[in-house]
Image (tube, rainbow, N blue to C red):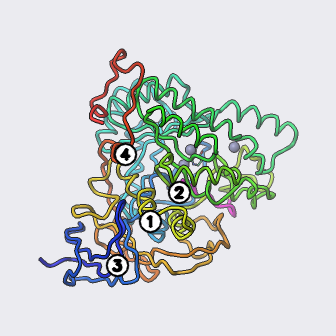
């Protein structure tokens, strides 16, 4: 057979193995992996390159209105272009419901904008702020059937916060319908109470954001989310884990047999609260929620990624410009309460982990593949298409030069943010060639994919069993009639 594309002479790493072989691609799919394949119609010489699955970034905010009503700086074009240049070939951003919005309208709106602009493949999670009867009985089950098999809920932010009763409602529904609940876990009243006192005393600078968002607010809410999940035996995923105590809380829950999953992000490995300790815009550049913490927490996050406590590494790309009204709506007078929460990272997520994690000797290349691609594919129900290098999967690949040395500057990035919190950092390794469904989307520092050429991926049920954790046993599911069809087999 003639291949549409061959990638020959590279060193391939999957979630489990590393070996030398060629890859044959036809109709966008990997059809053969073996040494000595004949050149296809298009042939890429991968000698000296590490051939890895394209990254899946399952946590990023693109062209989204935040809980505080601020618009992201990246749309589905700049956001996906930036992702592609950093070796990511699939993203799962959020379709955000704000209270009063109908879920089908929200999804249709995001789907239309992404369809017109995305250059790589994408799915959506739904941010749910209004779990009323219409949502629980009808709109959510429909969205899940349409392939939106995960929802994010918030335990803080006035505009988004659900109370524990509502969280139980959402978890029960997700268990029944086969969706995954992602939780932003911070204790709302702790943050509010500290912030109010800080503001009363005139402490308004960005660094006080990190004081208000204390690590105990994170660990308390995480523990509560875990207890709610265990009560009814429905798995949950805690996103953007920042603090050492939260890592330990999650590890303990897993040891108890609870089906708790968790994610962390580059800002919790490479930044600390000290980075925020600069006036005005300079500090605001490093602000996100939860905030980066200290060296001990950085180590705990590395340990969690290493031992499987944290199964996913995502960017939480939440892009706001600092030079226009985005990050600080009222300039340097903006208090930490009004400042946009979020840092960019969609392009540097993989290069930072490759350099510091793999080449720095903290994780293996196969762990890198699992943390950046394979685990996301299983967790979010897309392992039938994405997340590994296997015959039958989409040919989503990144060809890394493991020797390339760069010093990070914001001008080398393709997002629309205008700064990077990682400015000046030296890294080794870069994804020189990036391929999505057999199409070369980035090569020689050039974008080759067209606007709108990305595809919507309807996702299946989450398959956490694929990432090797035991099933949970809740206390009450049988009694309350909660045993769901979708999770039953796990
Ligand atoms: N939560 C996120 O997931 N991203 C940015 C800010 C936030 O609160
Ligand atoms: Zn969040
Ligand atoms: Zn805050
Ligand atoms: Zn986020």
- In front of the other: 458 or 215: 215
Left or right of 345 in this view: 271: right
Q: Name the mark on residue 145.
A: none
Q: Which residue is mark 4?
A: 468
Q: For the view shown, which residue lies furthest in the left direction?
A: 1
Which residue does the numbered mark 3 point to in the structure image? 10
Residue identifier under label 1? 365
Q: Is residue 135 visible?
A: no
Residue 160 on the magenta span: no
Residue 392 visible from this viewpoint: yes
Q: Mark 1 or mark 3: which comes first in sequence?
A: 3
Residues at marks 2 and 1, CA–CA distance in whole angstroms: 19 Å
x then y, percent, for residue 480: 37, 16
Q: Nearer the viewer, mark 2 or mark 1?
A: 1
**Tally of numbered discs:** 4
- Bounds of the magenta segment: 316-324
* In this view, 314 is above or below 443: above
From the image, give the main secondary structure of the stretch colored magenta.
loop
Residue 287 position within the rendered picture, expressed as x and y whole percent measured from the top left: 68, 53
The residue at 32%/58% (across/down) is 386
Q: Give how far apart the Cα atoms at labels 1 and 3 are.
A: 14 Å
Q: Is mark 4 within 8 Å of ligand 4?
A: no
Assign the N terminus to one quadrant of the image: bottom left
Whether the residues at callouts 1 and 4 have beta carbons within 8 Å, the answer is: no
Query: In the rendered view, does 339 fall on the left or right side of 182?
Result: right
């Amino acid at each position: 057979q003639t291949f549409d594309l061959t990638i020959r002479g590279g060193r391939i790493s999957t979630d489990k193995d590393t070996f030398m072989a060629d890859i044959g691609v036809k109709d966008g799919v990997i059809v053969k992996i073996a040494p000595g394949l004949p050149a296809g119609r298009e042939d890429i010489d991968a000698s000296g390159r590490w051939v890895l699955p394209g990254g899946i970034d399952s946590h990023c905010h693109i062209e989204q209105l935040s809980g505080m009503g601020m618009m992201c700086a990246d749309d589905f074009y700049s956001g996906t272009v930036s992702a592609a240049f950093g070796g990511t070939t699939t993203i799962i951003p959020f379709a955000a419901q704000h209270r009063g919005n109908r879920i089908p309208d929200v999804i249709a709106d995001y789907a239309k904008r992404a369809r017109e602009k995305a250059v790589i493949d994408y799915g959506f999670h739904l941010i749910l702020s209004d779990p009323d009867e219409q949502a629980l009985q009808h709109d959510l089950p429909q969205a899940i059937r349409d392939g939106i098999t995960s929802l994010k809920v918030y335990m803080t932010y006035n505009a988004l916060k659900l109370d524990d009763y509502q969280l139980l409602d959402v978890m029960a529904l997700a268990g029944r319908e086969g969706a995954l609940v992602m939780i932003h876990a911070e204790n709302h009243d702790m943050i509010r109470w500290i912030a109010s006192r800080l503001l009363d005393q005139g402490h308004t600078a960005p660094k006080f954001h990190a004081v208000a968002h204390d690590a105990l607010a994170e660990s308390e809410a995480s523990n509560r989310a875990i207890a709610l999940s265990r009560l009814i035996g429905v798995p949950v995923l805690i996103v953007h884990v920042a603090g050492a105590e939260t890592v330990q809380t999650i590890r303990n829950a897993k040891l108890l047999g609870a089906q708790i999953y968790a994610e962390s992000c580059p800002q919790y490995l490479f930044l600390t609260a000290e980075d925020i300790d600069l006036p005005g815009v300079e500090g605001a550049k490093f602000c996100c929620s939860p905030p980066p913490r200290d060296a001990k927490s950085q180590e705990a996050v590395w340990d969690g990624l290493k031992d499987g406590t944290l199964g996913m590494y995502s960017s939480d790309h939440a892009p706001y410009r600092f030079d226009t009204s985005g990050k600080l709506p009222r300039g340097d007078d903006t208090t930490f309460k009004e400042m946009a929460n979020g840092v960019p990272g969609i392009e540097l997520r993989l290069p930072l982990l490759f350099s510091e994690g793999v080449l720095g000797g903290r994780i293996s290349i196969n762990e890198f593949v699992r943390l950046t691609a394979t685990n996301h594919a299983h967790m979010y129900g897309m392992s039938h298409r994405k997340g590994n290098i296997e015959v039958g999967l989409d040919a989503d690949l990144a060809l890394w030069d493991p020797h390339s040395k760069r010093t990070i500057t914001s001008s080398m990035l393709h997002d629309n943010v205008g700064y990077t919190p990682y400015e000046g950092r030296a890294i080794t390794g870069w994804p020189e060639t990036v391929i999505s469904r057999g199409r070369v989307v980035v090569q020689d520092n050039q974008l080759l994919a067209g606007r709108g050429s990305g595809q919507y991926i309807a996702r299946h049920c989450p398959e956490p069993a694929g990432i090797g954790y035991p099933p949970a046993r809740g206390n009450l599911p049988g009694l309350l009639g909660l045993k769901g069809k979708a999770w039953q087999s796990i």
